[in-house]
Image: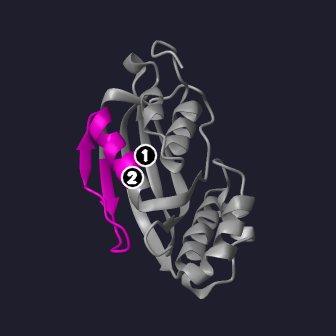
Amino acid sequence: MNRSTAINATDAISTYIFAKDSNRPELMKHAFAGDCELEMAVKTDAISFPSSARGLRQITEVLVTNFGDQYENVRTFCLSRPNIDYLPHFRCDWLLGLSARQGGAVRVGCGHYSWHFGSDDDGRVKKLVIDIEVMCVLPVEESEPIMQWLAALPYPWCSDIQACESIPAIEALRPIDRFLRRMEENKAAIV
């Protein structure tokens, strides 16, 4: 993509997810502005990240390069999609599954993305706030049903209902199931 080509919110988010999940740092410049910001709120001890980063290079190191050095088989899903192409802000919940390169332990997590897009940067991401609400760590022996579940979900856009319908019946995934069901209940309460 040419740097002068405008990008819409859906494409910026999809590009970020593909860059992170496939460890393709060179793609980040297509999704993020050069002077972008990252804020992280990690509410679990099962994974660690710095609380903030500034600039495309530093954010790429945190979210793609360093992340890719530690994890593989990464699948990230946004649980809702922007309903218009160009917007200043979009908030969505996410679901993530991956395995550790060392030892193969599986992690499944959920949280929230808060995307802020810049109109002066051709629609690229100016700021991303990531809240990690839940992160479950499971032994490598549990990886097959989890990876099969994640591989069957529509990628990278999936509804919480789709994720709930087929979540494996593994006790350690109950916090993920509760997070996804809470989302469904909140939507039902609004209607």
| Residue 78 picture location, percent across and down | 58, 50
In contact (CB < 8 Å): disc 2 and disc 1: yes
* 163 sits left or right of 3 in the view: right
Q: State the residue at coordinates (46%, 75%).
A: 103
Q: State the residue at coordinates (42%, 28%).
A: 29
| Residue 70 picture location, percent across and down | 40, 61
Mark closer to the chain start, 2 or 1 = 1
Report the residue marked by disc 1.
114
Report the residue marked by disc 2.
130
* 129 sits left or right of 173 in the view: left
**SS class of the residue under badge 1?**
strand
Quadrant housing the N terminus? top right
Instruction: Confirm whether residue 174 shows in the render.
Output: no
Q: Is residue 43 magenta?
A: yes
Type of residue at label 2? Ile
Foreground residue among 128 and 76? 76
Query: In the orientation shown, which residue stands out farthest toward the front?
Result: 102
Instruction: Confirm whether residue 62 shows in the render.
Output: yes
Q: CA distance from mark 2 to mark 1?
A: 7 Å
| Residue 144 picture location, percent across and down | 67, 74
Foreground residue among 87 and 172? 172
| Residue 8 picture location, percent across and down | 55, 26
Type of residue at label 1? Ser
- Where does the magenta region start and end? 39-67
Query: In the orientation shown, which residue stands out farthest toward the top?
Result: 4
Q: Which mark is residue 26?
A: none
